[in-house]
Image (cartoon, rainbow, N blue to C red):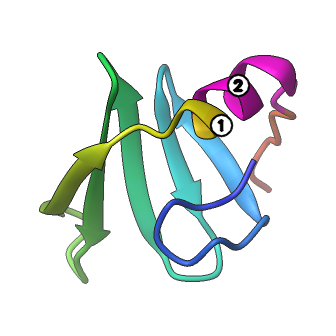
Amino acid sequence: MNCPLCEARDVGRIGRERYYCRECCHEWTKGDGVVKIYEVLSDGSVERLETKPEPESYARTLSSHSIIRRRAG
């Protein structure tokens, strides 16, 4: 799976339908055919940057790849 903002592959899942890119430090959610991108602020809160239609290839990629969950620490 690639980041919808910077196309990096170093992404992780942080919740149901919520993902984080370790390269550009942005979060995004997907659902209902829409990808919503958020900026992580210095205080840990998130601010919505943009919303764009979910490409069909992105939906296929997400459903065909298993997500590896990592524990902190």
> Does the stretch in magenta take in 64?
yes
Mark 1 Cα-neighbour bin, 10 Å: few <14, some 14–19, many ≥20 = few
Res 67 → quadrant: top right
Residue 65 vs residue 52: left or right? right
Give coordinates of residue 13: x percent, y percent: 63, 39
> Disc 2 vs disc 1: Cβ atoms closer than 8 Å?
yes
Indicate the amino acid at tag 2: Arg
> Does the stretch in magenta take in 70?
no
Label 2 and label 1: CA atoms lie apart by 5 Å
Give coordinates of residue 26: x percent, y percent: 42, 68
The secondary element bearing badge 1 is classed as helix
Given residues 67 and 1, the one toward you in this image is: 1
- Start-end of magenta stretch: 59-67
The residue tagged 1 is 57
The residue tagged 2 is 60
Given residues 11 and 73, the one toward you in this image is: 11
- Residue at x-position 59% and y-position 61%: 3
